Image (cartoon, rainbow, N blue to C red):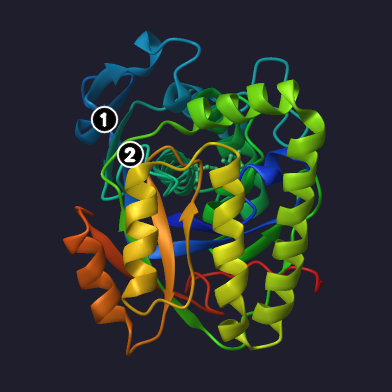
Amino acid sequence: MTRSATASAPGKVILFGEHAVVYGRPAIAAPVMGVQATASVTPNPAGGIRLLAPDLGEDQPLAALPADHPLGTVIRAALAELYGRPGGSPSHPGVSPLPDLLIRVTSEIPIASGLGSGAAIATAIVRALALSAGRPLADEEVSRLVYQSEKLYHGAPSGVDNTVIAFRRPVYFVRGQPLTALTVPVPFHLVIGDTGVASPTKLAVEAVRRAWEAGPARYEALFDEAEQLARAARGAIEGGEPQRLDPLMDHNHALPAEMGVSTPELERLVAAARAAGAGGAKLSGGGRGGNMIALVTETTAPAVTRALLAAGAPHALLTLVGPWTHPSHPTPLPPS
Ligand code: PMV
């Protein structure tokens, strides 16, 4: 049975460990519930399956999307999971005829800015398709399907974006390892400052890869340093002492900067946030543009936000990193 369904997915920020996480080191990331991507699935009276995403300039039948189209890929993977593949799949041995569907996507998350817009859109689509098929998927399954599109957006992604967005909770993530819970007994605030410079993650990841190939020892040492910071940050977060993150965040900013992915715009926003009273500040995500984050309190948040806007950020967004998860069905995770 196919019914109309709508689902949303949050943006995300990386607090510690970007780039190093691609090389097996841990990263800490959190959902940003203040910006969402939404997908709705309704019957398509014209027949067939059509993707309508005005924010992305898409209005095409699924059949016309090329094989390497990230959203086409995740839609096909989700339909195969939900309706079966010729020859069957371990979880769904039969094949059902595909319904006629209109998949509409909207997103408030800036594209190519390190806030996980691609993974959020893909997650919203997978969940809406699953609800419409009457077969809600576990967070783990959603994350696995969304990873298919992440590979096309990012090249060789670590999987941190699809994981934090599908699980909708702060995570301590290590590539290829089962997710364990990151507890946040004392919530803390971040201001996210946008440079306004779009930066596809794929290009930043490729630039770091080339530099790592040219100087592996230096880059492995930077990744090791990032690992120490992520471990220390986990201790501070789980110990309920987020104020201990301040120097760790400043230190972490220096690492992607040494990897060559900071920019004058990011440096200006990081400096402005620190000068306006942020505890710590760093670029967040792939770099070369995109967003930075600043640790703030309720008292320092307004001044830091104003300083970021004055330093050229087209947007600044306050978010809370907390113990909460999505209100509907938190997935239990093994304790760390
Ligand atoms: O999507 P972004 O820009 O937040 O970058 C993801 C983080 C990277 O470590 C740079 C890439 C990855 O796959 O983990």
Return the disc, 2 or 1, that comes first in the chain's sequence.
Answer: 1
288 shown above or below 14 = above
Q: Nearer the viewer, residue 124 or 115?
A: 115
Task: Give the percent coordinates (x, y) of residue 243.
Answer: 56, 85
97 shown above or below 137 = above
Q: Crowding near pointer 1: few (<14 within 10 Å), some, many (20+)?
A: few
Dot 1 falls on a residue whose secondary structure is: helix
132 shown above or below 12 = above
| Structural distance between the alpha carbons of marks 2 and 1 | 9 Å
Tag 2 residue:
111
Q: How many marks?
A: 2
At 78% from the left edge and 43% from the top edge, which residue is drawn? 24
Tag 2 and tag 1, C-beta contact below 8 Å: yes
Q: Is residue 1 visible?
A: no
Q: Amino acid at mark 1?
A: Leu
Asked where in the image residue 23 lies, by quadrant, the reply is top right
Q: Quadrant of the C terminus?
A: bottom right
Q: Nearer the viewer, residue 71 or 288?
A: 288
- The answer to whether 180 appears left or right of 271 in the picture is right
Dot 2 falls on a residue whose secondary structure is: loop
- Residue 56 numbered mark, or none: 1
Q: Amino acid at mark 2?
A: Ile
Q: Quadrant of the N terminus?
A: top left
- The answer to whether 184 appears left or right of 292 in the picture is right
Q: Nearer the viewer, residue 48 or 234?
A: 234
Task: Give the percent coordinates (x, y) of residue 222.
Answer: 72, 46
Q: Is residue 326 visible?
A: yes
Instruction: For ligand 1, give the image quadrant.
Output: top right
- The answer to whether 25 appears left or right of 84 in the picture is right
